[in-house]
Image (cartoon, rainbow, N blue to C red):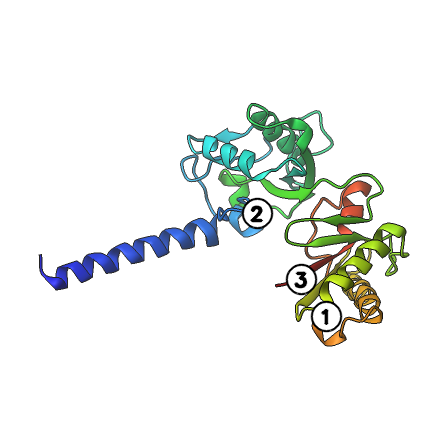
Amino acid sequence: MSKKVILVLVAFAVWSVVSWRWYTCGVKGFCGGNAVAASTNSDMNQPKTATQSPLLFSWSSSDPITSTRFSTLRDSLSSVVSTNEELIITGYYTEEEENLSNFANLGLARAKQVKQLLSTQMDTSQITTAAKLLASSETMQNYPFEGVDFSVVPVIPENAEVVELDDRTIIYFPFGSSNPELSEAINQYLTKLAESLDDTDQAVVITGHTDDVGEAQLNQKLGLERANIVKNILAKRGISAERISARSAGETSPIATNNTEVGRKKNRRIELMVNK
């Protein structure tokens, strides 16, 4: 075999791996860790067939349409949810659909149906269902669409104020507040963090988050205020402000549904990451 042929074959193999990686990670979100396949509004405006997607729904129906690929999706969801995490299934619905289910809306009915499908592989106590209202489209009315979304969030103990995860720490805030009211738990954590950073050059990134109550612009401002509160506390404890970045995601990056008080509480937070 000539060197030219070998080079062509090697180039084709590399292209195949890169293309597979792009589709698996960039398009479908299966890249390990806590990544979970998620449908978006634009996804649902594209015609689908039962062989293209593992899980679809028809207009005004809460009955799932599954393909042979559903078992792969179910196994993937089961593998990414750890002991201290929960899976949130958010069902989508529109005002124009006729709701013949026993639930308040078709979104919740769809989420409940998918939860039942997953019960053969997962502990249903780790699954929470929610619903989200979307604008309808002609595509959704005429073709099956991906009517649910999945997200994995940490299980938050009741009245928890600080939750330390492998890659970040979450500090929770009261409703509408930019002050975490230094409780013993928060005070101990920030003291410990400042001590651990004292002899290093590690940088800290603090991102403020809110629920979706109120105007988005005000929530963006509130998220930044929350991040700056924690930044200032660390600075007062000897960490150079130049090593601490404070920013806001406002209401744009929820880790739970905003349709319940429990979910909104999880979203009122700062996330603190130490860049090693």
Q: In the image, what residue type sits under mark 2?
A: Ser
- Image position of 50 (left or right of 203): left
Q: Residues within 10 Å of mark 3 (few under 14, many from 20)?
A: some
From the top left corner, tell me how far across and down residue 86 is, in percent: 66, 37
Please tell me which residue is depicted at 57% across the width and 28% down the height of the picture. Answer: 118
Q: Distance between the residues labelled 2 and 1?
A: 44 Å
Q: In the image, what residue type sits under mark 1?
A: Ile
**Residue named by callout 1:** 244
**Up-down: is 129 above or below 38?**
above
Q: Which of 132 and 122 is in front in this view?
A: 122
**Residue named by callout 3:** 274
Which badge, 1 or 3, is on the more N-terminal residue?
1
From the top left corner, tell me how far across and down residue 48 is, in percent: 45, 41
From the top left corner, tell me how far across and down residue 89 is, in percent: 63, 37
**Residue named by callout 2:** 137
**Up-down: is 142 above or below 212?**
above
Eye-nearest disc, 2 or 1: 1
Q: Is residue 30 visible?
A: yes
Q: How crowded is mark 1: few (under 14 residues within 10 Å), some or many (20 or more)?
A: many
| Residue at the extreme bottom | 242
Q: Distance between the residues labelled 2 and 3?
A: 43 Å
